[in-house]
Image: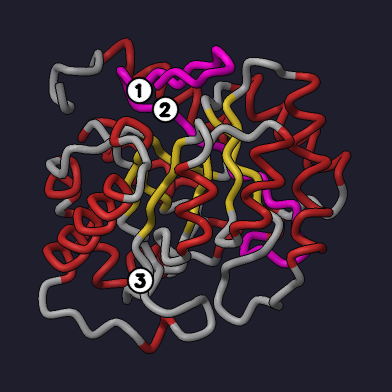
Amino acid sequence: MVFSSGRVLDLSEPVIMGIVNATPDSFFPESRFGDTTAALNAAIRMLESGAAIVDVGGESSRPGAEKISVEEEIARVVPVIKQIREKKPQAVISIDTCNSVTAGAALAAGADIVNDITGLRSGEMVEVVSQSDAAVIIMHMRGNPSTMSQMTDYVDVVEEVSSWLVERAQRAIESGIRRDRIILDPGIGFAKTAEQSIEMLRNVDRFLQLGFPLLVGHSRKSFIAKLTGSPVENRLEETISISTYLYLKGVDIIRVHDVQEHSRIFGILKILNPYGENGRE
C-alpha cells in the first residue's frame, strides 16, 4: 500500500500495529499516555522496536469509558501525530477515531490511516476518507462501547460478521473509497461475548477469504480471562500466543500493546517459518 506521500505499508508479510493511547483511561493502565510527550515517546519506541504502524487514539472505547468532546480528542491526538511525523517522516500513522472531524484533523496533521471502530457508520466519515489518500480500517461493532455488551445475539457470529464486513466494504467502494485502501477488522470483543471472540479467532481463515487485508486486535482483551483467568496486567503471554497463531495464519496486521516483545517473536517466526509456507500466500 503506497500513499501519495511516498510512505509505504508493506503487507507482503504480517506486520505489527502498535497501540498509542493518548488517554488517561484506556483499559490497560500501562498503555495510557496522558500527555503529548509520553505518547510521542511511546510511539517512537514502538516504531524503533519494529512496529510498521502506530495507531494513535484520544478516546477510550472500553465499556463505560467517559465520552469526551471532539475538541478534547483533537487536542490529545493532533500534537502527537504532528510530532511523530516530524521525527519519523516515513512512519505509517493511524488515527483511531469514529469522529469525522477528528479524522480530518488527524489526516491534515500527517496520519495515513483512519481506524474507525464504528465501521464507517457516519456518512461524514465516508466523505472524509473518500476525499483523501488515506486508507481506512472498517471494524465490526454493534451499538457503541456503552451498549455493545447487550448486543451479542448472533446465530452464527463468524458468518454474520463476515457478511457485514463485505457489505460495508462494498458500500465504501460505491461511495468513492478505493478498494486498495480498505482494511477489515472483525472487532474482537466489540459486541461479542468471550466465547464469540474465541470462535472468530478459531475461524480467522474465513475473514482472510474476504478479499481485503485483515487486521485483528486481541491484545490483552477481557476474553482472554475466559481462557486463563489472568487479569489484564498479566496477559502478555496469552496475547503473544494468539499473535503467533495469527501470524502463522497470515493475518496482515496484528494490533498490540507490547511491540518489542512481539517484534522479537515475529523475528524468530520469519526465520523458522518464512511467510507463505503455512500462512496465506
Q: Which stretch is magenta?
A: 1-28
Q: Is the magenta stretch mostly helix, strand or loop?
A: loop
Give the camera-side residue of 16 and 125: 125
Give the camera-side residue of 167 and 11: 167
**Amino acid at pointer 3:** Lys
Question: For the residues carrying marks 1 and 2, which lies nearer the camera in this image?
Answer: 1
Q: Tell me the number on the disc at residue 11.
A: 1
Question: Is the residue marked by circle 2 packed among few (<14), some (14-19), or many (20+) residues within 10 Å?
Answer: many
User: Which residue is identified by label 3?
Assistant: 226
Secondary structure, mark 1, is: loop
Quadrant of the rendered structure where residue 13 is? top left
- Mark 1–mark 3 distance (CA, rounded to whole Å): 31 Å
Tell me how the rendering is colored.
secondary structure
- Mark 1–mark 2 distance (CA, rounded to whole Å): 7 Å
Residue 181 sits inside the magenta stretch: no
**Amino acid at pointer 2:** Val
Residue depicted at x 15% and y 61%:
163
